[in-house]
């Protein structure tokens, strides 16, 4: 009897110690505030279940909040990629005067996404580590959402070039449709809210820019026209761009809207030659951030 009693006592102490130690460990490991009593089973069973459920809900809520914060952060970053600083709201911009006359230049591509040539353009830009800006046509983006997504995933800025790419005069309702529907689709496809706009053909008085100004878009024109819409030989295109390149400039090129084979052929040369001259490539939002402050 003596023997079995002396065995039972240390055994009980051992179990008690085990419970206390594991409870302490668990309370350190678990991020939730579980009650000691719950773990050692002193609470009523129903209460335990309710408490455990509450803790689970708290955990899920914490996780959801963390996920939401991450997504918001990601969205903010992506949106910044395609947003002009507010000082450019409702302005028409052809080029900027960069701080310290820094040799920066922005390549812009219009009228896509276009199945073959947009992909080729993206491949060349990636290979050369160049970030650019794509002024997409709503209708074309609807046909090629994958390329729209890739433009953003590759770190380029995406911008609005209307839904139908019309040149004729548009009343306020039509102009609103052309611009708003395109911005909505860009958002739907890529998650990016752009405030960059370029009127087709650079027409400033057919109703589109009036709507863009009302809605505080920055209207982006260009300072160096590659004239690639005339499909010149690639060497001619390269020379035209180089002749018109200057710090703070905006280069107009096309990745869609027609046969852009020659633009694709000229692009690596345009990048190489500009780099040789000391230029670095920026997106439109990055370029606008570099505007010399008055
Ligand atoms: Zn265009």
Image (tube, grey):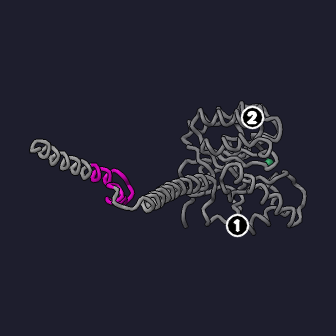
Q: Would residue 99 be visible to someone looking at this image?
A: no
Quadrant in the rendering for residue 112: top right
Q: Which residue is mark 2?
A: 117
Could you tell me which quadrant the C terminus lies in? Answer: bottom right
The image shows residue 14, relative to residue 41, as above or below, that is above
Q: Are marks 1 and 2 in contact (CB under 8 Å)?
A: no
Asked if residue 32 is positioned above or below residue 279 in the image, the reply reads below
Circle 2: element type: helix
User: Which is more N-terminal, label 2 or label 1?
Assistant: 2
> Residue at left 67%, top 57%?
193
Q: Which residue is mark 1?
A: 216
Q: Going 25% across and 53% down the picture, which residue do you hit?
A: 20
Q: Residue at x 36, y 52 (%)?
A: 30
Mark 2 neighbour density, 10 Å: few (under 14) some (14–19) many (20 or more) = many
- Residue 215 x %, y %: 73, 67
The spot of residue 183 in percent (x, y) is 74, 56
The residue segment tinted magenta is 22-40
Secondary structure found at label 1: loop
Front-most of residues 63 and 247: 63
User: In the shown orientation, is residue 11 left or right of residue 267?
Assistant: left
């Amino acid at each position: 009897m003596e023997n079995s009693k002396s065995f039972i006592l240390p055994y009980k102490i051992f179990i008690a110690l085990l419970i206390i130690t594991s409870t302490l460990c668990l309370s350190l490991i678990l991020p939730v505030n579980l009650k000691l009593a719950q773990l050692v089973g002193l609470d009523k069973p129903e209460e335990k279940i309710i408490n455990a459920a509450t803790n689970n809900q708290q955990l899920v809520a914490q996780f959801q909040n963390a996920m939401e914060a991450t997504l918001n952060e990601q969205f903010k970053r992506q949106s910044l990629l395609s947003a002009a600083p507010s000082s450019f709201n409702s302005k028409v911009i052809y080029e900027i005067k960069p701080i310290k006359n820094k040799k920066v230049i922005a390549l812009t591509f219009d009228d896509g996404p276009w199945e073959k040539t947009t992909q080729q353009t993206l491949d060349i830009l990636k290979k050369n580590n160049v970030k650019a800006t794509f002024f997409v046509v709503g209708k074309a983006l609807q046909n090629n959402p994958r390329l729209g997504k890739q433009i953003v995933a590759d770190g380029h800025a995406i911008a609005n070039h209307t839904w139908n790419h019309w040149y004729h005069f548009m009343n306020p309702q039509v102009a609103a449709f052309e611009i708003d529907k395109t911005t909505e689709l860009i958002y739907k496809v890529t998650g990016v809210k752009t405030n960059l706009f370029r009127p087709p053909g650079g027409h400033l008085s057919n109703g589109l820019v009036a709507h863009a100004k009302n809605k505080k878009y920055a209207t982006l024109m260009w300072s160096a026209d590659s004239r690639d819409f005339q499909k010149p030989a690639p060497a001619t295109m390269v020379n035209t761009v180089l002749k018109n390149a200057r710090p703070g400039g905006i280069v107009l090129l096309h990745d869609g809207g027609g046969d852009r084979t020659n633009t694709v052929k000229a692009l690596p040369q345009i990048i190489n030659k500009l780099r040789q001259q000391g230029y670095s490539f920026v997106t439109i939002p990055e370029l606008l951030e570099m505007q010399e402050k008055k």
